[in-house]
Amino acid sequence: MNNSLILIIVTTALVNNVVLSQFLGICSFLGVSKQLKASASLGGAVIFVMTISSAVANLLYTFLLAPLQLEYLNTIVFILVIATLVQMVEMFLKKTSPGIYKALGIYLPLITTNCAVLGVALTNVQDGYGFVESVVAGFGTAVGYTIAIILLAGIRERIDESSVPKPFRGAPVVLLSAALMAIAFMGFGSLAL
Amino acid sequence: MNKYVERIYNGIVKENPCIILMLGMCPTLAVTTSAINGVGMGLSTLAVLIFSNLIISLMRNIIPDQVRLPAYIVIVASLVTVVDLIMQAYTPGLYSALGIYIPLIVVNCIILGRAEAYANKVTPDLAFFDGVGMGLGFTIALTVIGLAREFLGSGCVFGIQVLSEEIFHPIAIFGQAPGAFLIMAILIAILNGASISTRANDKVEGCDGCCATCAKSCDSKEKEEAKA
């Protein structure tokens, strides 16, 4: 049991990295990776939201949609739940822990439209994961996202100090870095699991 | 130029959602492993975009301003569910190839972006043609990127072998995940070199450039922070 959970974490975080092999959450991956500090905060916010939303989505699916045979409505239900959940998390943090809110607050609305959050909820259903597995998969995926965005931010801070050929300045060099990272992450695919 | 033709020209060339506005990067990178997947994804997005633009434009005076985003999301999610079920029934091959990216059309920035930026301000006929133009622009861009990746990655065009392996040794990486980033990097570098202004470079400077919605919420947050 424990082994299979560790397997899920490794698979979701490294082998099937959400950004570098599934291409989910590209918008924020490219947009908020300029500074290490900001990208680490976004990563924290994503871990927080994705773990909670995976849990809530799983409970809704098992106890509401499946018994009523409304499985085909899962896209609509999940996106609404995620949007509401992010708002509630935001309000909750604002009231209870201003410290965390200050660090993550401005990134929370960004996450509503982050396709990775909806993507994980839908993949969990497709893979037939139970409650614990869904939560672990959500957490692992978010950790993978955080690893990817922090690495890219580190690379971009270095690139800022070097001279890049003019046509490649801006987006192209960032995408090239992402391409090299994706090649590196392909190496995890051969992990004997 | 006729104002409807202008909308279509605008969507395909002047403000191509994929290449100039850089919206909907996730499906662009993910499904373009072959040209036929690009066409499939493009057309399903086109269908959703036309109807979401039309419905949102028709309802623009009914939906209260404060709850417009949740309302748009419900409209778009319903349309996506319809497309999802239709594809599952009639094109099972394509449906399994595109997999999770079909339901994820809901969060495609192009759809909410057009709703926010255009469809909720104009009459239904203009919104309809804007949807057609933007959808076609997205389809064409995805097909071209798919063609390039398929050709470089396997020497095929639409699944037909055009160059035998003896003449052209396929560069398999273009068909895999890193190839998507690589092709986009080269494409934007060419556009930059030709001084065609795109929003690609703004996009990496901040969370602006993604969805009209998320950029806006970010801005207002920052202002709030500054005030406090």
Image (cartoon, coloured by chain):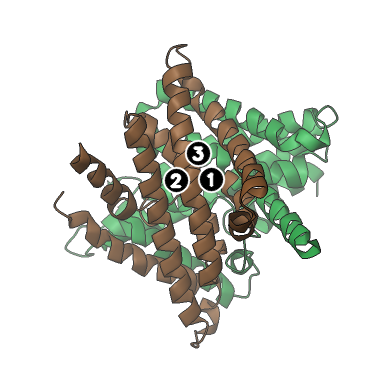
Residue visible at 48% across and 39% down in the picture? A52
Q: Quadrant of the N terminus of chain A?
A: top left
Give the residue number, with chain letter if any, for mark 2.
Answer: B38
Regarding mark 3 in the picture, which secondary structure is present there?
A: helix
- Side of B144 where A108 appears, left or right: right
Q: Are marks 2 and 1 in contact (CB under 8 Å)?
A: yes
Which chain's colour is green? B
Query: What tint does the image give chain A?
Result: brown
Tell me how far mark 2 sits from mark 1, CA to CA. Answer: 7 Å
Residue type at numbered disc 2: Gly
Q: Residue B139's mark?
A: 1
Regarding mark 2 in the picture, which secondary structure is present there?
A: helix
Residue type at numbered disc 3: Leu
Disc 2: CA contacts within 10 A as few (<14), some (14-19) or many (>=20): many
Q: Nearer the viewer, residue A22 or B32?
A: A22
From the top left corner, tell me how far across and down residue A21 is, in percent. 35, 53
Q: Which mark's residue is nearer the viewer, 3 or 1? A: 3
Among the two numbered marks 3 and 2 on one chain, the one whose residue lies closer to the N terminus: 2
Q: Residue B104's mark?
A: 3
Among the two numbered marks 2 and 1 on one chain, the one whose residue lies closer to the N terminus: 2
Against A63, is A132 above or below?
below
* Residue that sits furthest to the top in the current view: A68
From the top left corner, tell me how far across and down residue B215 is, in percent. 68, 55
Regarding mark 1 in the picture, which secondary structure is present there?
A: helix
Are tags 3 and 1 found on a single chain? yes
Q: Nearer the viewer, residue B158 or A118?
A: A118
> Which chain letter matches label 2?
B
